[in-house]
Image: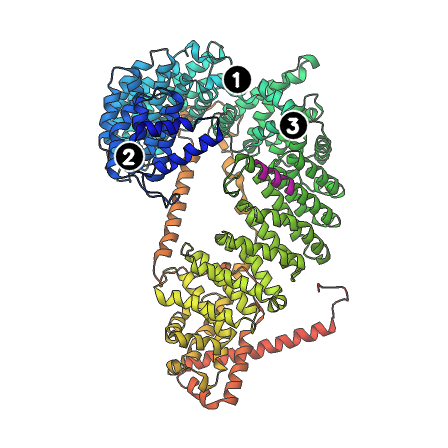
Amino acid sequence: MNVDAIRSRIVATLSPDTNVRRAAELELKSAETHAGFCDVLLDILAAEAEDAVRLSTVIYLKNRTNRAWAKSDHYPDESLIAEDEKQRFRDRILPILAASHGPVRQQLLQMIQRILHFDFPGKWPSFMDVTLQLLHANNAPSVLAGLQCLLVTCRAYRFKGNQDPSRNEFDNIVEASFPRLLEVCNELVNQESEEAGEMLHIALKAYKHATWLELSSFLRQPQVNIGWCTVFLHTIAKAAPATAMSEDLDERERNHWWKAKKWAYFNLNRLWIRHGNPSAVSTQTDEHKAFAKDFTATVAPEILKHYLQEIEKWVAKTAWLSKPCLSYTLVFLDECCRPKEMWPHLKPHLTNLVTHLVFPVMCLTQEDVEKFEDEPEEYLHRKLSFYEEVSSPDVAATNFLVTLTKVRRKQTFELLKFINEVVSEYEAAAEGAKSHIAKEGALRMIGTLAPVLLGKKSPIADQVEYFLVRYVFPDFKSSQGFLRARACDTIEKFEQLNFKDQNNLLLIYRHILDCMADTDLPVRVTAALALQPLIRHDAIRISMQQSIPTIMQQLLKLANECDIDALANVMEDFVEVFAAELTPFAVALSEQLRDTYLRIVRELLDKNAAKGDDDGEYGDYLDDKSITALGVLQTIGTLILTLESTPDVLLHIEAVLMPVIQITLENKLYDLYNEVFEIIDSCTFAAKSISGTMWQAFELIHNTFKSGAELYLEDMLPALDNFVQYGAPHLAQKPEYVAALYGMVSDMFEDQKVGGVDRICACKLAEAMMLSLRGHIDQSVTGFITMAMTVLSGHDVKVKSYKIHLMEMVINAVYYNPMLSLAVLEAKGWTNKFFSLWFGSMDSFSRVHDKKLCIVAIVSLLSLNPDQIPQSVQTGWPRLLQGITILFRTLPSAMKARDEALKDDYTFDAGSYDYEDEDEWAEEDTNWQTEEKTEEDSQEARDESTAYLEFLNEEAAKFSRLESQYKEIDDSDDDLGEDSVLLESPLDKLEPYQLFRGSLMRLQQEQPQLYSTLTAPLTADDQAVIQGAINQAEVNAQAALQLAAQAAQNPPSANGGVN
């Protein structure tokens, strides 16, 4: 392949002439599949002087290796690069990397990292040798290339723990390369150039990846660890070079020297939190425990000392610290609160730390104030986001206060003393001299402490109401919008407070309503969020009943002003609590919710279109708008549930909501599917009939399923079940709808990607069709038997629940039409197989639903004449009655278990939701005045993070046990519980005892010989069970007559009930 020809084509791809460019791209596309294409591109990279040509070349090389280095599902038809060409690539790429710079080098590194995934170490054993040669070189570009190669290696291994077989080889790489890496770092940290900053940044990041999960034995050696910690501490203490101190603070944080400092802090924190803290390694080896003990005694106090020195410089304004540096400092302080070895080192500094570090970073910055005024929505997202990035010092400070007051309870008093000083000073200051920022910060601090202040046995809880009245209430009328917003937020934080003076509650309510009409958006939103928890107070809830339509209008207006998902939660709660008051406005409310949803979704679609998604699918895109849309859908769902008793209103709302269903399903907004299917389910279930509008929804569901949403069948199933059950008369007249439903079931069985759990949903849909469309779907039933028996006779089904549902598919067919079913089974030679499986598994049909289904199917078989019974099962036919005795013997206990399960579902145990236990005050913590006992310093504070890890381990163990059940064979005990029957069924209305008695009496009268053949093998015990079932049928018949008589005496009023 000619190098000059390929280079000329690459140059042509940079032409401003579209035709020239397109022709060159097509020629290169054709050339890339020829042997030697990668060799030619490497030749160009090695010799090329022009940056634009080098960059274009490396992008072609990256695209070719991405698609053709190994077989990929994304590029199944791509011709792979030959092994000899790959070897030449591996031999040449690192020298080319060392000679490259800028974007070309970055592209090469991404390429190398991907190839390492496939080829290292097996096919590329020389990679580490070349990397070490580069690290030992005497020129900076080579060392930089060596550092970057080491970084991509560490990154490739970062998630491999000790249980991974390749971890040993990585530990050997670390032992071979990290001594030189440490030497390089010690040289770099004393230099000033940008190049040195970049190299140090990469080196410290390599350490981060190498120690992400495990600290190798080599790195745990005392001298090695001290060497690395010394480099980290030198990096932290180093005065940033002048070139790293840009006026633009964002640009400054992006500088390599500040990134190096960030990773130095991170690595020290990670060493302490994951490897050096004794509580973190309590379940590990003696070697790990010895390292942690030594680290806690000698290294951790030294880290704390250096961190405090940096904070002193920051407070004195002799040094600047980036947000990550401040955050990591606060995270380290947080982790020093619990261990008894570190608490004495931290405690003497607390007052200074709270005053000069924690409080200042919790106060609003000038940037925050500007955002409040100029970009209020951005301000809200920043303040309300629970997924705040790690580099936010105010979030780290908040977490520190929470930990401190939970594990060192008496420190709460010191914090309150500080807060009181700030708010008292604000109160006393003249209007023009008040520090509004400080007051806002103090209220944020006390709001953070709310769970502790209101905890059980708290000695402070009684004083909170006075604090709110004196120091918070006035801020509802503050001249500063951010203080009005903070007043609302503080009330929300103390929502668990039980007010002694009900007038204070009503005063809060009036203030919150005023703030909901505030001129500043953040005030309106925080007021709305504060109102939500206040509805637990009777006084406020009663007051709101008169105003709820207006309040809902304000909330909807707010939801259209800003996409804050928490507002949708407020609306959902209000719709549920004030259902009666909102019913007259339900249609208007649903229209407004629809319009809000459509606006958000259209903006979401426009945003995705602007991003240039090739496939036009938006399912992977979940952001604030998606989450807000989800909340609006949940509010709509709640509104529908409150309207079950008003079918005429519901019918109107169905038409209103059709665009919501349409836009979601047609645009494949997968994240919103579940809620949309729930809305369809709620509408059809509440109405107990299917309107024309909902049949349109059915067509949309079917189209959605067929266009790639098969795995959402579980979410669709409740709605589909309603269509089948309540739309049966219509379906009987619409064969195309029946064919659509049948197609959904058959698709699930034909698709090899679909597992047993998803196929269970298909079995349930088939069952719904056979139970509700009796006599109308003979052809479908034949297909259902074939689907189920193909699986059951093909291989051993491991998952018991799947096996039961497959058998029940055929049992349903038997109940639907025994003659038809036996004919299908006989034609395929499956009759004996099926009956052996069914009657051999009778004990596995444990739920009431299963037992009733088996009983009605057996009763159907008992109705057959002797000449209709296939020859192959005639000898086993007497087992029918033996099977039914097993079912009737266990039916009463199953019914009792079902009633218990239902009772459990609807019993609320208030005690199980008492979240305040962790905030309970111990007796020795409740005295404000007493001096702290010195032994507190020597106590290990309770470690909730360790407890949480233990909880996760327990959950993982439970999950493993659950998983192993699925892996066991038929005799495993993964019986289906009653809670797995969530759908209503026509079987619920059938009374099995009377059905059986009637069938047995007919059999005795009409076919006495067959009756004798069936009853002869019964034991005395079996006969007693059958007699008991007949007696129970008499009892049930009498009870039914009495109910009918009572109903006749007390007929319902003309307008009662739902048609």
Q: Counting residues from the N terminus, which is met first, the one under dot 1 or under dot 3? A: 1
What residue is pinned by disc 3? 485
Q: How many marks?
A: 3
In the image, which is nearer the foreground, mark 2 or mark 1? 2
Circle nearer the viewer, 3 or 2: 2
Q: Amino acid at mark 1?
A: Thr
Q: Amino acid at mark 2?
A: Gly
Q: Earlier in the sequence, mark 3 or mark 2?
A: 2
**Residue 684, magenta (yes or no):** no
Proximity of marks 2 and 1: CB atoms separated by less than 8 Å: no
- What is the image's colouring? rainbow
Looking at the picture, tell me which residue is in the foreground, 305 or 513: 513
Residue 418 placement: quadrant: top right
Quadrant in the picture for the C terminus: bottom right
Please name the residue that numbered disc 1 is placed on: 355
Residue at the spot of label 2: 36
599 inside magenta stretch? yes
Region of the chain picked out in magenta, as a range: 598-607
Answer left or right for 925 relative to 369. left
Quadrant of residue 94 within the rendered picture:
top left
